[in-house]
Amino acid sequence: MVKLSVIVPFYNVQQYAPDTLKSLRANARADFEFILVDDCSRDETPDILARAERELPGAVYVRHEKNGGLATARNTGIDAARGEYLTFLDGDDWLAPGYYEQLLASIEDLGCDFVRTDHVQCTARARTIHRVPQGRRGVVMNPRDAILPADRSTSVDYAYAWAGIYHRRLVDRGLLHFTHGLRTAEDRPWIWKLHREAESFATVGLLGVFYRRGVASSLTQIGDVRQLDFIRAFDQVVAETAEDRDAEKLLPKAVRTYCAIISHHLGSIERFEPAVARKLKSMSAVALRRMPQDVLDDALDSMDIQRATRLRRLRRRPAATGVAA
């Protein structure tokens, strides 16, 4: 029986894939499988993965004939996974040796639906520890209790899928798949759904994932139209949260976070291609008008002057024709 399935999407990461695969080898165990999903790479990544399928214990290689984005690639891995537990890694990141054995032990000891972990962010030569914004460690909690407060960073803002481990029962309940086709912010509707609908979780102070920040091919560094998928992602968060039994309590957090992300993108709009920048403004203005207006008013009142002014100005922007999220 497979104890742990590790789902690793790859897309045009020939420079980094060898390090990722080497770290997987240093985490291999007879009852672990590594599902390597190539999302129709156009560089040498497929050749690297084909070799890994032969040489890496537990490797399962799956190749997409059409690029579908990170969410779709992860879903392919989830559908192929046979493990009692699942976790994720991105194809340009890496792991400490023996990390997965410790991660598996943590969730088995705690007996909860999912466990979230800290990670190390790597930018050039700099290393920074990033912690789950949850003070209680090693204690099983109700995930819903970790969504609020609205005006502070909480567990739903720490959306990295690879910073944790998940029991198969979440797959069976339809809680682990991602929204098909999302090319950015795919973790946001996913983490919100987990925290609204799973029954138990915990955080642990375990470090072992090294997240490579600033990769040139990463969507966080590319200012093309794919970045605008964050609007579809947060529309989903707000719409699903509005249907929740605790919508009145939870919507202010969802709306305020959405506003903060819009403001963040507007604050660095110069990195977008000109046509995309115009579309960002138009789509964001429409998105603001779609939100529950009373909740939006309260969210803007709670934000700092600079962000609130930027968003109020955008909210008054005349609606453009033919703009869709």
Image: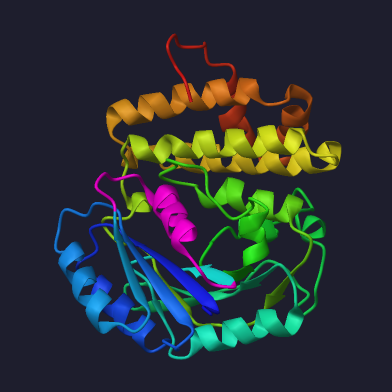
Is residue 184 one of those drawn in magenta?
no
Residue 115 appears left or right of 211: right
- Residue 170 quadrant: bottom right
**Residue at x-position 55% and y-position 69%:** 86
**Residue at x-position 73% and y-position 25%:** 292
17 over 230 or under it: above or below: below
Whole-percent x, y for residue 211 in the image: 42, 70
Residue 41 appears left or right of 211: left
Q: How many marks?
A: 0
Q: Nearer the viewer, residue 75 or 322?
A: 75
182 over 53 or under it: above or below: above
- Residue 18 quadrant: bottom left
Residue 291 appears left or right of 57: right
Whole-percent x, y for residue 118 in the image: 58, 75
- Per the rendered image, the range of residues in magenta is 64-84
123 over 238 or under it: above or below: below
Whole-percent x, y for residue 9 in the image: 36, 61
**Residue at x-position 44% and y-position 8%:** 321
**Residue at x-position 53% and y-position 80%:** 1
